[in-house]
Image (cartoon, helix red, strand yellow):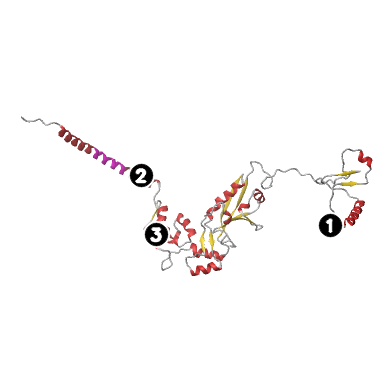
Amino acid sequence: MISYEGSQPEGFQPVASSQDFEQLEILREEANVPLHEPLPVDYNVVFSDVSDDLASSSSEPEAACSAVKTTGRKRKNQATDDATGTKRRGENFVYRFKGDILVKNFKGQKIPDRCGEVSVESKKVADISAGIWEQCRGKVYRGVTFHDSPHEIIAAEEDRSIAIVKWDDELPNFENRGRFMYFLDVKSKRSHRPDKVDSKTLLSWEGKEISVVILKYSDAVTTLKRWNTVQNNLLRPKEKDRAGAASVSAVNAVQAELKKQHGKYLCSENVGWYCWASFICEKPLDERDELIRSAPPTHLVDLFTTVPVHSDVLLDKARLDLQVANTVNEAYGQILPKLNEDIAQVQQIFDSKRRPQKLLH
């Protein structure tokens, strides 16, 4: 009699016969176990149909059943990335990403503005993410926070000092980029968060049209109503005169900044600079910095003239500067000899005072 003792080995599948099924039904009736419930398993199995001679011929117990061997096509081992499970690439493998940059003022905007494209390649996924953010961060302005629940709106109407929307204290950066951008598969319309992009995602994007969608004022601006709230409370000029134009103090501040940045190569009367500054002050706040760095608008170009920078003009200016320097040097050449004579006369006076005078007898 051969018995199998111990736990069931992994992958062990015994071969059962019709007699075994009949014996199982008898055991169920004896143990009063319903058909839909499994029998308790005991691996101390005793096979009574095996002769004692066969059992005594071996000193070690052997299982009198065969395991079913699973068959299938052998697959070659593939080296995988421990972090992502994707197939490893060679050390010289380069990841590439190229896509359009689409800018939205609010998240639900149907037709975004195309503002260029981004193209990055690197051997590291982290460098790809950092490169995309560096090329797109100029399209992001600043995040906002809303306090527009019904109770907060009522409180803001009663107290004007309470703001329904305000700028975030934290500026846009690489860590919070998920609030300002996401990736969009143009064909499937599926979006991807930037912090979820890994090597597997980049490989799956090969041959697909992927765009980078920029949320200029963060994902808090979800609807057109909220976008209008941002414009009216944060972007439009608050200091206005009686006619509704920007205040004089705001225009003067912009005018001083324009002269500081463009005064080296642009010349104009004060009225020209003032008209340029007034034009900029009528624009939203998020556009002013770019307008200050840019050239004058087309309708004001005639008020400005460029400082001459041609070679002949520069040569004439250099010659004039040399003439002035020569004149100054000649003047010093005439002053220094005269100064030496004055010093010599003063020295003689001091020497005469020091000499002892002879007494007259």
Query: From mark 1 to mark 2, how far is it between C-alphas?
Result: 105 Å
**Bounds of the magenta segment:** 324-336
Q: Main secondary structure of the magenta part?
A: helix
Q: Could you tell which of marks 3 and 2 lies nearer the N-terminus?
A: 3
Q: Is residue 147 shown left or right of residue 274?
A: right
- Establish if 146 lies above or below 120: below
Q: Name the residue under label 1.
A: 37
Disc assigned to residue 11: none
Disc assigned to residue 252: 3
Query: Secondary structure beneath disc 2?
Result: helix
Q: Is 328 in the magenta? A: yes
Q: Which residue lies furthest to the front in this view?
A: 31
Q: Is residue 43 shown left or right of residue 52?
A: left
Q: Where is residue 268 in the image (x, y as percent from the top left)?
A: 38, 56
Is residue 303 or residue 202 the one in the foreground? 202
- Establish if 83 lies above or below 350: below
Q: In which quarter of the image is the N terminus?
A: top right
Q: Where is residue 322 in the image (x, y as percent from the top left)?
A: 33, 42
Is residue 171 or residue 49 the one in the foreground? 49
Say if mark 3 contacts mark 2, CB within 8 Å: no
Q: Could you tell which of marks 3 and 1 lies nearer the N-terminus?
A: 1
What type is the residue that disc 3 sits on?
Asn
Q: Name the residue under label 2.
A: 318
Q: Tell me which residue sits at (33%, 44%) in the image.
A: 321
What type is the residue that disc 2 sits on?
Ala
Query: Secondary structure beneath disc 3?
Result: helix
Nearer the camera: disc 1 or disc 2: 1
Q: Tell me which residue sits at (89%, 46%) in the image.
A: 46
Is residue 73 or residue 361 the one in the foreground? 361
Q: Residues within 10 Å of mark 1 (few under 14, many from 20)?
A: few
Nearer the camera: disc 3 or disc 1: 1
